[in-house]
Image (cartoon, rainbow, N blue to C red):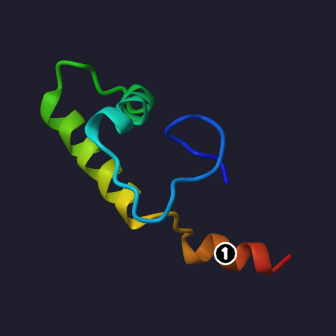
Amino acid sequence: MMNLLHGSGPSRPAGADATADDIRPVVEAVCNELGIAARERRRRAAVEERVLLAWRRGPRQPLDLVRAGLDG
């Protein structure tokens, strides 16, 4: 599985904790895609919080996507 923080290589080991510095490139990419400017600190902090939460939860697939892959 691709490591989204570093672009390639294996996914994170179980129990690995990301820091703000680790996820900064991901937060920047998400904010850029959403059009959130650097001066919008509250919105960027919310994005960072959600990215960290998603990282800690680990990889997940919405059930609809899983089901769609099985219906083929």
Location of residue 49 with respect to 66 vertically, above or below: above
* Direction from residue 23 to residue 61 in the image, left or right: right
User: Residue sitting at 65 percent across and 38 percent down?
Assistant: 8
Image mark count: 1
Q: Is residue 11 left or right of residue 67?
A: left
Quarter holding the N terminus? Answer: bottom right
The spot of residue 6 in percent (x, y) is: 54, 35
Q: Residue at x 57, y 77 (%)?
A: 63
Report the residue at 39% width, 33% height from top. 34
In this view, the residue in front, 69 or 51, is 51
Looking at the picture, does residue 45 appear above or below residue 58? above
The amino acid at mark 1 is: Val
Apparent side of residue 72 relative to residue 66 in the rendered image (left or right): right
**Residue 46, image x, y percentages:** 21, 44
> Where is mark 1, residue-wise?
66
Q: 48 or 17, which is in the foreground?
A: 17
Quadrant of the rendered image containing residue 48: top left
